[in-house]
Image (cartoon, rainbow, N blue to C red):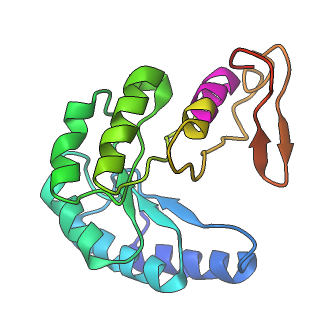
């Protein structure tokens, strides 16, 4: 069944009640909403104290992202499919993203750092998209650790056997935080 903004808002309210202040809440819209729907949802999430609303509308709608990001205090995020800093320029110039989400698995670590530095010049944090196996998770974790103001790393817990078995050693996760190893390499 199609998800309506009203139905999604009711779900978000229930999640907010269930979670309380034990963790940050973020929603990925997967570019599925119209701007009007996204605005309705964004206003509700903002009022509920959610941390961000990720890619609510089609990616290429820079002006729509700028309007959404200006309409709420909560950051509107995006850019996970972009691979070079030049693709982020219009979003940064128009204040369309409150957080950029360049994925080190797609853009590479060097370009990921270029994107993060450029976003930082605009006062925009970088929280990488990360929905991959353990190796890419470790790469993105190192990217986050190298940021001037690190925030959070998305961590998929349902990847299957390649999630951690692809690594020599599974990293420690303590109290919801992935602990980077002291040894060289990505893990």
Front residue of 45/174: it is: 174
Please tell me which residue is depicted at 66% across the width and 41% down the height of the picture.
Answer: 156
Front residue of 151/67: it is: 151
Q: For the magenta stretch, what is the residue range?
A: 132-141
Instruction: Count the marks.
Output: 0
- In the displayed structure image, the side of residue 44 where residue 58 appears, left or right: left
Instruction: Locate residue 33: give its quadrant.
Output: bottom left
Q: Tell me: residue 135, above or below residue 28.
A: above
Front residue of 40/88: it is: 88
Instruction: Locate residue 138: give its quadrant.
Output: top right
The C terminus, quarter of image: top right
> Can the viewer see residue 102?
yes
Prevalent SS, magenta region: helix
- In the displayed structure image, the side of residue 176 where residue 43 appears, left or right: left
Q: Position of residue 87 (x, y in %)?
A: 21, 35
Q: Position of residue 113 (x, y in %)?
A: 42, 31
> Can the viewer see residue 55?
no
Please tell me which residue is depicted at 42% across the width and 21% down the height of the picture.
Answer: 110
Q: Position of residue 26 (x, y in %)?
A: 54, 63
**Residue 177 located within the stretch drawn in magenta:** no
- In the displayed structure image, the side of residue 156 where residue 174 appears, left or right: right
Instruction: Locate residue 5: give its quadrant.
Output: bottom left
Front residue of 12/76: it is: 76
Please tell me which residue is depicted at 80% across the width and 28% down the height of the picture.
Answer: 181
């Amino acid at each position: 069944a199609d998800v309506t903004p009203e139905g999604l808002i009711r779900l978000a309210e229930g999640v907010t009640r269930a979670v309380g202040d034990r963790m940050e809440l973020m929603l990925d819209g997967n570019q599925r909403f119209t701007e009007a729907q996204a605005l309705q949802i964004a206003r509700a999430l903002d009022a509920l104290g959610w941390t961000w609303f990720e890619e609510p509308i089609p990616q290429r709608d820079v002006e729509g992202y700028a309007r959404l990001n200006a309409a709420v205090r909560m950051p509107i995020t995006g850019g996970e499919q972009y691979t070079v800093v030049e693709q982020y320029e219009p979003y940064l110039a128009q204040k369309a993203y409150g957080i950029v989400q360049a994925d080190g698995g797609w853009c590479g670590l060097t370009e990921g750092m270029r994107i993060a530095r450029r976003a930082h010049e605009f006062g925009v944090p970088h929280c990488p998209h990360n929905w991959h196996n353990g190796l890419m998770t470790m790469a993105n974790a190192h990217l986050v650790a190298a940021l001037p103001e690190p925030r959070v790393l998305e961590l998929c817990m349902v990847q299957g056997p390649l999630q951690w078995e692809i690594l020599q050693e599974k990293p420690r996760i303590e109290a919801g935080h992935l602990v980077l190893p002291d040894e060289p390499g990505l893990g």
